[in-house]
Image (cartoon, rainbow, N blue to C red):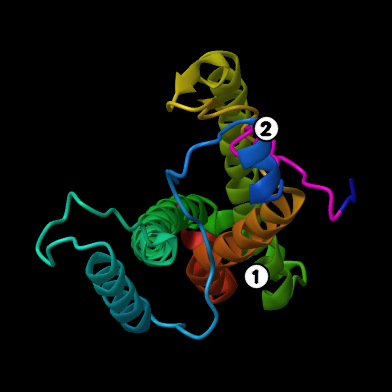
Amino acid sequence: MQVVGIYHTDEQEFRRSCYIPYSTYKTIFDTSDKIAAINFSVNGPSTLQEHKAFEDEYTATLKSMHDIAPDDDSGLWVRNSYTENMQMGKARDVLRIALWILGLLTLISGIVGVSNIMLITVKERTHEFGIRKAIGAKPGSILRLIISESVFITTLFGYAGMVIGMVACQIMDKTVGQKAVNIGFTEIHMLENPTVGLDVAIEATLLLIVAGTIAGAIPAWKAARVKPIEALRAD
């Protein structure tokens, strides 16, 4: 025998096939003249419409060659994986967009909540800011103080959410992830070892910093505009 390639299976063992010549298979396993299925790939069609047209033309040709009525869908079954993958890809894109919209709305609500908290904090600390300005503090230092506090609050609770998410992933791995689902020819684990990549964690950290800066911008601007005399008179 001649080795023509090495085939690696994925972690879920979807692909456990061994490719051998058809003549070898017929010699070892089957001596009849029947073929259950033919799998092949084509070059040329690239769009969904082109693949659909090729599928219709190929199906019509096979039906004509084997005396199958053109409207007999049970006489010949053709499965076009490319069109199925494109349709699934569109569904994934719609789901991804919906998740992004939901995430952005959640982030905006969080920014508004932190901003309201910082506004209340600035109002309660008006006297403090007046004293700071009276002894020489510049508006820029007060800006940095409020924004840093806002970033700290946002990052703290953001990381708390990350920790909760990691715990949820571990719980799913130990419960649902250990359950095997039989799909006919093999068994798969739907949520086995769910993890979050380092790049996602870094992006989330940067997003938390930006969100905290935005949330503290307006309260910091108001705190920096406090006049020392009016602040010292405030209760």
**Quarter containing the N terminus:** top right
x and y percent of residue 228 in the render? 59, 70
Say which residue appears at 89% left-offset and 50% top-offset: 3
Q: Is residue 187 left or right of residue 200?
A: left
Span of residues in magenta: 4-19
x and y percent of residue 189 in the render? 55, 25
x and y percent of residue 173 in the render? 59, 21
Q: Is residue 17 visible?
A: no
Query: Front-most of 89 and 99?
Result: 89
Say which residue appears at 73% left-offset and 56% top-offset: 199
Q: How many marks?
A: 2
Magenta span includes 8: yes
Amino acid at circle 2: Ile
> CA–CA distance between discs 2 and 1?
80 Å
Magenta span includes 127: no
Mark 2, mark 1: which one is toward the viewer? 2
Query: Relative to 30, does residue 63 appear above or below in the rendering?
Result: below
Furthest-right residue in view? 2
Residue marked by disc 1: 143
Q: Is residue 113 left or right of residue 153?
A: left
Amino acid at circle 1: Leu
Query: For residue 28, which numbered disc appears in the image?
Result: 2
Tell me where residue 194 sits by quadrant: top right
Tell me where residue 65 sits by quadrant: bottom left
Name the dominant secondary structure of the magenta segment.
loop
Say which residue appears at 51% left-offset and 62% top-offset: 215
Say which residue appears at 61% left-offset and 61% top-offset: 207
SS under mark 2: helix
